[in-house]
Amino acid sequence: MAERDINEITPEILEYAHMCNDSGVINPELYTKYDVKRGLRDINGKGVVAGLTHISDIISSKVVDGKSVPCDGELYFRGININDIVHGFISEKRFGFEEVAYLLLFGNLPDKAQLTEFKKVLSSYRSLPTNFVRDVIMKAPSNDMMNTLARSVLTLYAYDDKPDDTTIPNVLRQSLMLISVFPMLSVYGYQAYNHYICGDSFYIHNPDPELSTAENILRMLRPNMSYTAMEATVLDLALVLHMDHGGGNNSTFTTHVVSSSGTDTYSTIAAALGSLKGPKHGGANIKVVEMFQDMKAHLRDPKDEDEVRAYLKKLLHKEAFDKKGLIYGMGHAVYSISDPRATIFKAFVEKLAVEKHRENDFELYSMIERLAPEVIGEERRIYKGVSANVDFYSGFVYSMLDLPTKLFTPMFATARIVGWSAHRIEELINSDKIIRPAYKAVQEHLPYVPLEER
């Protein structure tokens, strides 16, 4: 028998795929008949309550005269409004990542002494096992940085003397280590890809223990290790805004589900990374950047509102870009009037655009933010409002920071590992039950037919 090419889709695979399609289709009417909450959401898009959390809260509507009315979106970390948190560290000219990580993990804002000590703890964990870069990261570099990141996380299991210990002190130790090394795993993984697959120069810069997480990311990524104060400030802000977003987002819910099985921290975080990788979740900002690139290539005048509006309609009619019928970066599963993260981001995006001489791009983004909800409202029957989400601006920010597209989602993960860690600890403290939702079987029962009679 000839050796099979494992990458080839052969005729028999195509035939098997047709069989999967034929046997896999479920009559959509059955979902209504059995009141199935598809996507764990009701018909209005509201999520099914599957748990309780202290960590973060999302508000998108308020009750007025006994009716639920959409409102400007609000996000709270441990009960504190994200606007107040950001204003606090920005006005005092501090980086916020470490301070907000402390808040999410331990439930309160640190005082000066606690923050100083916590930074030292994170810095002490900001190193990888001996030869890990050579033996793991540099071996078999991948085109996909999220897969590289997940592989590195799973491999760290082998370097842990107590990998399966799920007591809170041990899980916290593992979590602090992962929070500290995620920037290194992400950037080093990219440098290996850039060298071995793209043929460019190979740089491995050690982190500086005196620098913040955002500063170290830029230091490790750039050949000359240099960056501006504005660049570090905006990247730090991006990390804070992406750090957590309620317990119901896909990757955080994955963290709860996998943690409930009693498995180890490394397996749990690898599962969350697999969820975040998806283009409907953490990969969405890449789609935004690609959509704008396509838009600029096809617009004669990016300042012509009529021409821009026509392009947006083509997107919705599956006549432009990837022909999926989507305007990427617009709309959110929870928010309708506004996403507070996007609102906060916008002011700093404009400042960075000025520094990077990309004011025209910012004007186009602002125009799309204004026009897209109008066009969607005209072309779609929607049950709630549509506004720009955090992905709309984050991809633009990362491109202005000269972050490679391959690192967009790993940067999201570098922030969200804090939220995942807090939610994993909360799950382990509060529940000893494995999460197991019900599925209704709709296949009729059939008799077994002997092989010779089929």
Image (cartoon, rainbow, N blue to C red):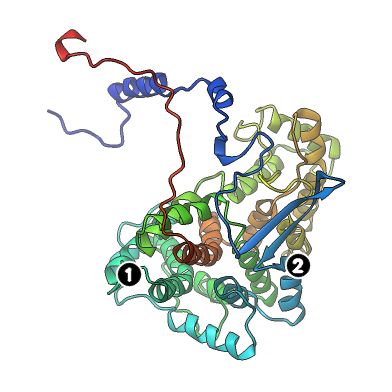
Of the 4 image quadrants, the one containing the C terminus is top left
Residue 196 position by quadrant? bottom left
Compared to 274, does 78 lie above or below? below
Q: Is disc 1 surrounded by few (<14), some (14 to 19) or many (20+) residues within 10 Å?
A: some
List the single residue furthest toward the right: 65
What amino acid does circle 1 point to? Asp
Q: Nearer the viewer, residue 297 or 138?
A: 138
Asked whether, in this view, residue 225 is left or right of residue 379, the answer is left
Badge number at residue 17: none
Q: Position of residue 364 (x, y in %)?
A: 78, 49
Label 2: how many Cα within 10 Å (few below 14, some 14–19, many 20+): some
* Front-lying residue, 105 or 380: 105
Say which element carries label 1.
loop
Identify the residue shown where x is 62% and y is 44%: 47
Q: Is residue 429 above or below residue 326?
A: below
Residue 415: quarter of image: bottom right
Q: Residue 170: horizontal and vertical position, in percent? A: 38, 74
- In the rendered image, residue 343, in percent from the top left (x then y), is placed at 77, 58
Please, which residue is most extreme toward the bottom here?
113
Say if residue 404 shows up in the picture: no
Quarter of the image where the N terminus is located? top left
Left or right position of 167 against 387 = left
Q: Secondary structure at mark 2?
A: helix
Q: Residue at x 44, y 49 (%)?
A: 435
Q: Which residue is mark 2?
A: 83
In-image side of 152 versus 97 (left or right): left
Query: Can you give x and y, in whole percent of width and height, for residue 145 in the image?
Result: 44, 56
Q: Residue at x 65, y 42 (%)?
A: 291
Front-most of residues 275 and 255:
255
Residue 34 sits in quarter: top right
What's the distance in space between the residues labelled 2 and 1, CA to CA?
37 Å
Circle nearer the N terminus (2, 1): 2
